[in-house]
Image (cartoon, helix red, strand yellow):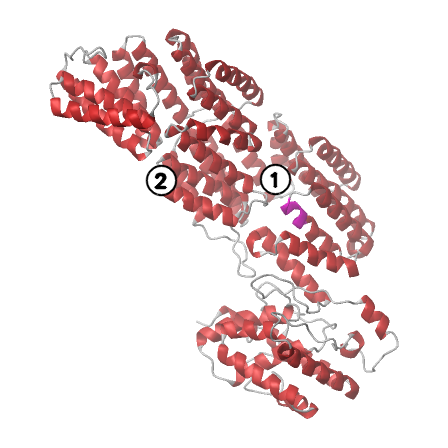
Amino acid sequence: MASVHESLYFNPMMTNGVVHANVFGIKDWVTPYKISVLALLYDMTASKISLPERRRLNKLILPLQQGPDLSLGQFLKTVEECCPQTAYAVKQRLQEMADGELKDMEYFFSTLPTPFTAFDSEAYKTSVVGLFMRHMLLAYNKLSFSQVYKLYKSLQLYYHSHYAKPADGQSSLPALVADDSDMDLTSTEDTVGDRIDREELDTPMHESELRSDNAPSRGPLSQKQAEYFLARQAYLLKNDENKALKPAALQEELNNMLKFNPDFAEAHYLNYLNSMRVQDIFLSAHCLLHYFDRLILSGNEGKSNGDEGYGRSLRYAALNLASLHCRFGHYQQADLALQEAIRIAQESNDHVCLQHCLSWLYTLEQMKGSDSTVLTEDSVKMAAHFCLPYLASLGNQSLVQQGATQGETAHKLMDALKDTDILHWKHSLSELIEISLAQTTSIWRMYGKSTMALQQAQLLLNMSSLEPVNFGVQQNNTEAFAVALCHLAELHAEQGLYCAVSHILQHLKEQFPPHSQHAKLWMLCNLKIQFERHMNEGKYQMAEPLVTAISALNKTEGLYRKAQVLKALNRSTEAYSVLQRLQVHCETTKCTEVVIRVMLSTAELHWESSGFSTALPLLLQALALARKHHLQSLASETILHLAFTQLMLGVPEHALSVLHEAIEPVLAHGSVMDKGRALLLTARCQMAVAGFRLNGKGPADFHLAGLAVDTLNEAAGYFSKLNCKERLRDVHYLHALLHRSLGQTSQCHKSAMLFRLLDQELQSPAPPVSMRL
């Protein structure tokens, strides 16, 4: 099968998604660099090259033609990486022309095989390569003798400047580059009159797209090359930010462009995107307003639409400004800009813009914590009426998210997502398909179905994007990918697979740099995993500093973990105060999951003061809330708390029967810590039912005592996986008591020795086993 990149030679108008049929405009000059590209094309057709090398060179042709002019050193290095033999042949051909005479350059152009003169030429006449060669020949034939001589001198300077300063890593391009009038296809004279003034104004813009270090070169950029540079950088910022220029380097290039062309609207927009990368609100708003100002002043909108184009720019400028303020949390300014966009859209009877405004309106209400269900439903209906599938799908996904927080059943939510997915696949809405999979992953995790969540996350990460792949970049740095990877990291951390977690987090750090938009997701995920690990290992002093960092990213999560640390450090009064403040906040914002966790932590505080009967109403309320919202994981954890409370109240039989309801989902979907705690509690219930007491009284039911030993062994395995030494100390203590009562002296001594070793290592008094779940 022929390579895709061979279409650069054979397939008419095939441009790999980057250029169009009219590839080369009338304003491309003949430069020494373009002669080097011609020499490359000549040697590619004249010499025999292996298929892998030819494919690599074919991939290189389009960036070489469309990109900015490179120095000879950069050009030869780039070609040599693909095919050293061809790089050497190009160097020899340029040397023959540069060290020879003018007739050598004339001979090169006269013998150059073209799609129009050579029947055996590999380049099709309307392919990218064919059009480039035709353009260069026409431009060269248009030159006068004095212009040809200047081009030859420029070629000599271009070649010899590379060897004049071998110590320099980068040589500058020749100063004798033909100007606009010299190389314009429409010019037949050597117009010198305004040359000096024009050279002062048209100082070249530069950026090498082919250098691996992304450092700026000194090659001139034409208008087409500048547009190519902007399009490439904008695409990379959207799809793979790591391959784009660094924010400072890109800012320098854009400032250079705008210095000589302040009305370049596209450059202002890319400047806006670059400012958003570093969260610069002032410069972002400044560049966005400049973009729409220049768009209106340039008349691009008005040429085809008249006054309507002017109004369209104004209303979308206001809408974009509203979205910018939404992103930075400036809700009042966003509301004012949104009202302005709605007013202008209503005056112009622009239903599409009004639908976008309505979408942002319910989004803004959600961000402010208000109920936006009615607005969202209206938006979905109107979007479907005006045949706007993207906005309709976004609205449906928002309704699913609201339904999940309001306690809708899982089957209703999944049916809604299925209907939305059909719409996504019908219209090839790749981005919304990714969001849907990430949303499904989050919903399954919320319901406590870790296996299903893992499956959905893997499905998203292994899915091929439906978006066209330009510049060799796949779309994999969206928020959906970040969310899926964070879920994957947390799921692995719950199972004690911290080595895999470190690999996932490392990939997240590389894919989403700290200054990027979605970096906060993995930062919070990383901090939460570290916190839970320190808490499981009993390193409370190391977990305490992480609370401040978590609070900076998410105030609610920070407060909850602050209460956990205070409770672990036996500062119960402070912990209770924090929990009460957090519960009021979460009930206001309708954060049901955190409300249930706060109730469970408050019940644990009651246990410390032996207020088991006081904890019962809280636990029953938490269980009712978890079941109402179908939160199976939290419901199972609440049942464990209820069983422990019943055990402490002296009814172990009821506690054991209650445990049977929760143990299956915990073992199927719970974390390693939850499994260990559930089994430890089960063993204690079995010991209590068997008649065993912590005062040393032997069991009446030896069968249940034997089951308790097996259950403790299984729990010890889970705690060992997490290096949870405090829990292991409790297990060895109970083991020793059980073995002693069963008359198993050697096992008793072994368990007692393990307990003693852990107790000495921890150097902290063990809390009463009867006071902790």
In depth, the one of 537 and 70 nearer the eye is: 537
- Say whether residue 429 is left or right of residue 382: left
Q: Quadrant of residue 97?
A: bottom right
Task: Give yes or no for residue 642 being in the magenta stretch.
Answer: no
Measured as percent of width and height from the top left, residue 201 is found at: 82, 66
Q: Quadrant of the N terminus?
A: bottom left
Asked if the residue under mark 2 is in contact with the one under mark 1, i.e. CB atoms within 8 Å, the reply is no
Identified at 66% across, 56% down, the residue is 250
Report the residue marked by disc 1.
Answer: 384
Highlighted magenta segment, given as a residue range: 273-278
**Closer to the camera, 495 or 12?**
495
Label disc, if present, on residue 259 of the rendered structure: none
Counting from the top left corner in percent of width and height, residue 278 is at 64, 45
Query: x, y percentage for residue 287?
Result: 74, 48
Residue 626 falls in image quadrant: top left
| Residue picked out by circle 2 | 497
Q: Nearer the viewer, residue 641 or 295?
A: 641
Q: Main secondary structure of the magenta part?
A: helix
For residue 666, side relative to residue 57 (left or right): left
Of the two numbered discs 1 and 2 on the same chain, state the one appearing first in sequence.
1
Q: Position of residue 317 (x, y in %)?
A: 74, 44
Q: How many marks?
A: 2
